Amino acid sequence: MSKIRVYELAKLLGKSNKELLDILIDLGVDVKSHMSSIDNDIAQLVEESLRGASGTEGPGKKEEERSVIKTDSYEVSKGSTVKAVAQLIGISPAEAVKCLISAGLMVPADSPVDEKSLKVLQDAYNVVLTMACEDDAENEGADGTCTVIKRPRFHGDHMEPRPPIVTVMGHVDHGKTTLLDFIRKTNITAREAGGITQHIGASTVMHEGKEIVFLDTPGHEAFTSMRARGAQATDIAILVVAADDGVMPQTREAINHAKAAGVPIIVAINKVDKPAAKPDRVRQQLSDVGLAPEEWGGNTIMVEVSAKSGQGMPQLLEMILLVAEIEELKADPTVKPRGVVVEAKLDKGKGPVATVLVQEGTLCKGDILLFDSACGKIRAMIDSEGKMIDCAGPSTPVEILGLATVPQPGEVFTSVENERIARDALSSREQDLRNAQQGGPRKLSLEDLYSQL
Ligand code: GDP
Ligand code: MG
């Protein structure tokens, strides 16, 4: 009798793995996880029972929950024209002007909006419009008008699903770079457009319509520097093990880092195209260090791949999405932006540039950021496909320009009201650090430094 895996059936039926597991358990089927196999006739039974029950609960309720979140709210920078605001809320400039006239306000389409006219438009079109950035000369376009930045207003309490952030780990020469290159090459849309994408240290790739974010920083480095600062940027670790070499010292180290951080591991048994490949030997060695493969009744997902030929790569990406779904990764795009530095350097032409990962909230051009050791105002933002963007939500890697100094990888940041607050916070941190150094009899360890930043 043919069988089907729980996650495959879930996908076919448009259910989450968790929903489907609940249904199966209710039906008395013996299933352990999304990887469990069930007979096809049971699958059919589930499908029929779902068809019978459709429309009674579930979907309807979800729709309702979602509609509450739907109120659009925008921040409008000072000096934005009526025309720009009209565009933002999806009406014609003429309609906006008419609306203002009917409220007794004579404002031409090319004039800047004031608080009063914003309020009129807000009430008429059922959106939330707020005026932002007092001193924003930098947001001015060439014609002297300000750009309108579309961002959710800070209100919080709007958790939304976010893409998983993945780090690739493993022993040297086992194929980490080749694997990342293959995934990027085949899944980044901008490449197809012919542009040579600039490399920012992280990339967002698409698989089956869903986004996955890959960090380029080798896993163990990212883990240690970020964890020392109390930040964690990784949701899933891909452990690359070469099938012709097996578990090596850095493989074990990587496992320990991921375990200490509580990050789920997916094993990519790589180089299976090689004649000397022994994937089962790798499974055995991993079982011996506490990672038993699911196909042997354990809990670790293992996928045989060749980063060179691409064999097994779609399955690996599918497993990443599967684990991400089980983890139920969520973030709130409407809270104050917060995130972590992935890479940073001083560029001769551009000055300090930092690739950051937004973890909560929505980061926008013009925001003032305070890092552990640096601060500055975002002058421009570039996404992993090299496009200039105005705003970036949770799980988006972006390169930012405009900082005064270069922050360190692993530093966290938040946005603050103005540059004075940022500078004051930095100088008081520096003072604390100096005091501690003078007072302390022993030399400070790196850990001490981090804890004081
Ligand atoms: P890293 O040190 O983990 O980043 O490993 P690299 O990606 O630099 O790969 C080390 C070597 O293994 C390179 O010569 C790659 O071409 C080769 N390699 C990587 N993946 C595969 C694979 O799937 N099959 C084969 N045959 N060679 C591979
Ligand atoms: Mg490498």
Image (tube, rainbow, N blue to C red):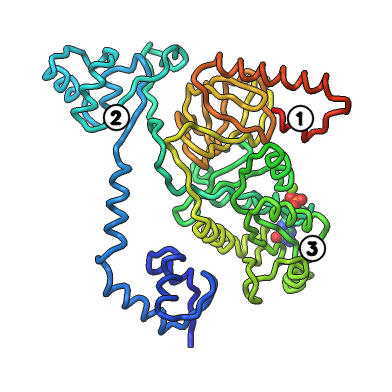
Which quarter of the picture shows residue 443? top right
Three-letter residue code for mark 1? Leu
| Nearer to us: label 3 or label 1 | 1
Q: Quadrant of the C terminus?
A: top right
Q: Secondary structure at mark 1?
A: helix
Q: How many marks?
A: 3
Q: Is residue 427 positioned above or below 304 on the image? A: above
The image position of residue 55, as x and y in percent, is: 25, 65
Q: Cβ–Cβ below 8 Å for labels 2 and 3?
A: no
Q: Is 318 situated left or right of 51 in this image?
A: right
Residue at point 82%, 21% (across, down): 439
User: Are there few (<14), some (14-19), or many (20+) residues within 10 Å of tag 1?
Assistant: some
Q: Earlier in the sequence, mark 2 or mark 3?
A: 2
The image position of residue 201, as x and y in percent, is: 64, 38
Determine if residue 195 is in view. no
Q: Is 144 situated left or right of 225 in this image?
A: left
Q: Which residue is mark 3?
A: 247
Q: Which residue is mark 1?
A: 449
Q: CA distance from mark 2 to mark 1?
A: 43 Å
Three-letter residue code for mark 3? Val
Q: Is 12 situated left or right of 97 in this image?
A: right
Q: Secondary structure at mark 3?
A: loop
Q: CA distance from mark 3 to mark 1?
A: 34 Å
* Disc assigned to residue 128: 2
| Nearer to us: label 2 or label 3 | 2
Three-letter residue code for mark 2? Val
Q: CA distance from mark 2 to mark 3?
A: 56 Å
Q: Is residue 212 positioned above or below 428 on the image? A: below
Q: Earlier in the sequence, mark 3 or mark 1?
A: 3
Q: Earlier in the sequence, mark 2 or mark 1?
A: 2
